[in-house]
Amino acid sequence: MVQPVTLENESPQRQHLERESLCEPVFEYFPACIDFLTSTKCEKPSFQCCVNVAELNLLAKEGIGPRWICWCIEYMVEGLKPPLNATRISELPIKCHTHLSFPISEGMDCDK
């Protein structure tokens, strides 16, 4: 199993570049779920959203780790209007027939 990535010994500028690089797959996969997670009009997540959740689960288990995925999502949704909906977050794994190997919440506090 791949160990989660750490950047503690890197310069702040290098850390920023590394974080953006590490977040690229999350930035690619997560947007497909934004409509479902922020709207009350979508009854179910798109097929692509569910496929991408599976990819994110794989990244959480064998790639960058669940905390990094959380941080990337936190960065991506900061200031998002409307914000993530707690009910929709809990429905996502059920409606995609899977589980989440990474945390998502309406407050997105990945340090907890």
Image (cartoon, rainbow, N blue to C red):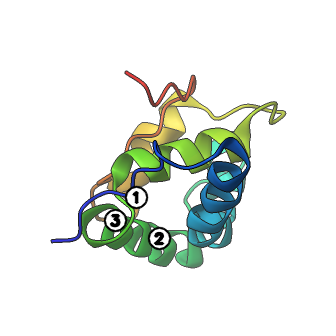
Nearer the N terminus, badge 2 or badge 1? 2
Q: Residue 63 appears at what percent x and percent y?
A: 35, 70
Q: Residue 73 appears at what percent x and percent y?
A: 59, 47
Residue depth check, mark 3 versus mark 1: number of the one nearer the observer: 3
Q: Residue 50 appears at what percent x and percent y?
A: 47, 70
Whole-Å distance between the Cαs marked 3 and 2? 11 Å
> Does 6 sit above or below residue 63?
above
Residue 50, numbered label: 2
> On the image, numbered disc 3 is attached to which residue?
57
- The reply to whether callout 3 and callout 2 are in contact (CB within 8 Å) is no
Counting other residues with Cα less than 10 Å from the Cα at mark 3, is it few (<14), some (14-19), or many (20 or more)?
Answer: some
Residue 95, numbered label: 1
> Does 54 sit above or below residue 107?
below
Quadrant showing the C terminus? top left
Residue in front for this viewpoint, 86 or 9: 9
Nearer the N terminus, badge 3 or badge 2? 2
Mark 3 belongs to which amino acid? Answer: Asn
Nearer the N terminus, badge 3 or badge 1? 3
Counting other residues with Cα less than 10 Å from the Cα at mark 1, is it few (<14), some (14-19), or many (20 or more)?
Answer: some
Quadrant showing the N terminus? bottom left
Which residue is at 43% across, 25% downward?
111
